[in-house]
Image (cartoon, rainbow, N blue to C red):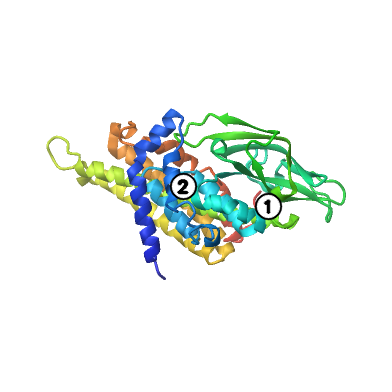
Amino acid sequence: MDFDLTPEQDQLRDAVRALGRRYGHGYFVDKAKTGGHTTELWDEAGRLGYLGVSVPAEYGGGGGGITELAIVCEELAAAGCPLLLLVVSPAIAATVIARHGTEAQRARFLPGFADGSLKVVFAITEPEAGSNFHRLGTVARRDGDDWLLSGRKCYISGVDEASYVLVVARIAVDDGPAGTAGTAGQRLKPALFVVPTDAPGLATSKLDMEILSPENQFLLYLDDVRLPADALVGESLDAGLPALFSGLNPERITVAAMGAGTGRYAVERAGEYTAGRKVWGGRTIGSHQGVAHPLAHAAIQVELARLMVYKAATLYDAGRDLEAGVCGNMAKYAVGEATTLAVDTAIQVLGGNGMTTEYGVATLLGAVRAGRIAPVSREMILNFVAQHVLGQEKSY
């Protein structure tokens, strides 16, 4: 088993790390507190090819995989700049279109993903259904050659920065028994639509969040949004389910990579502080086991979680989707726990300084706590592992 990155991946990691450190956590916090966006960092990362590392080379991308994109997510976060839009646009939307879009859709959208000039966000979660696509209330119906899309979505990241939203809806298909919202002789199945953010009938409402982030969260309201036939992702109505799952595994993996980078950042900041701070004229506070041991424990947990991130990414890039799904969920769970521990421990060992903006660890509290909830909660991951790994009866 080879735990080493390839020379090209090592070079990517070093280059992204250098870029992230040029901007740093202070830049990230300033953008968040002033209501700005990390546009300069995003644009530079796009020009350098980092945002398009997983886009096929024939469309202007780097031709790599989710492993390379995970490296980008992790290293920017390790520099104090965790960019959530890396997850929703390059990881989810670009992967869905690359793997399941029509040739026309790939030619239209992938070059923009490759250079970062196009941002597409992802909308699956709903107020009543959560992320359970079997119970989604957003529906699409035919109107001649067009589609009409109606429903509500919540906690949709970055809509104010995006040109399109990749919306998960359900459509009625006349080839099965009645679905929960269908009619006799119909069943409802998932489908994905590329919706312009300025489409008539699409309205947004910003959510007030207790998370310090330059990327905002929104409610979406779709009221008979009219879309052309080619807004449906894929060649047929059967493309929806595999397209959806092809985006969810990269989502889990890159969210976990971003979280692992954040954990590394917190441990590094705390380690620098405790190795240099002396009190009462004595040794550094890091020489005391009451400080050093919790910090070392957090570092171990972050490193263990990182291993699962790259196992999941390697499996995904090898086309082993079922195994990647299991490991991606495990990675997301492990990183959520480890990063929350790392940030909390960093704050504790810094004492009062840990709660200041200047020292740059308390500014991560809301985001890492949300990482145990979204994009899939730790409890749902435990349900998944219990059912699919341990063979237990489904509990819900």
Q: Which mark is residue 331?
A: none
Could you say which is closer to the camera, residue 21 or residue 291?
A: 21
Residue located 37% across and 45% down the image: 342
Tag 1 residue: 233
- Inspect this view and state whether residue 4 appears: no
Q: Secondary structure at mark 2?
A: helix
Q: Secondary structure at mark 1?
A: loop
Query: Going 66% across and 48% down the picture, which residue do you hit?
Result: 396
Between label 2 and label 1, give the one nearer the viewer: 1
Residue 24 visible, this angle: yes
- Residue 94 horizontal/vertical position (percent): 57, 52
Question: Residue 56, relative to residue 77: is it above or below?
Answer: below
x, y percent for residue 282: 13, 40
Q: Amino acid at mark 2?
A: Gly
Asked whether 379 or 220 is in front, the reply is: 220
Q: Is residue 15 left or right of residue 68?
A: left
Toward the right, the furthest residue is: 184
Label 2: few (<14), some (14–19) or many (≥20) C-alpha neighbours in 10 Å: many
What amino acid type should be assigned to the residue bearing mark 1?
Val
Residue labelled with disc 2: 336
Q: CA distance from mark 2 to mark 1?
A: 31 Å
| Apparent side of residue 295 relative to residue 236 in the rendered image (left or right) | left
- Quadrant location of the N terminus in the rendered image: bottom left
Residue found at the very far left of the displayed protein: 281
Quarter of image, res 250: bottom right
Please provide percent x and percent y for residue 13. Answer: 37, 56
Residue 154, percent from left and from top: 61, 37
Left or right: residue 284 compared with residue 200 = left
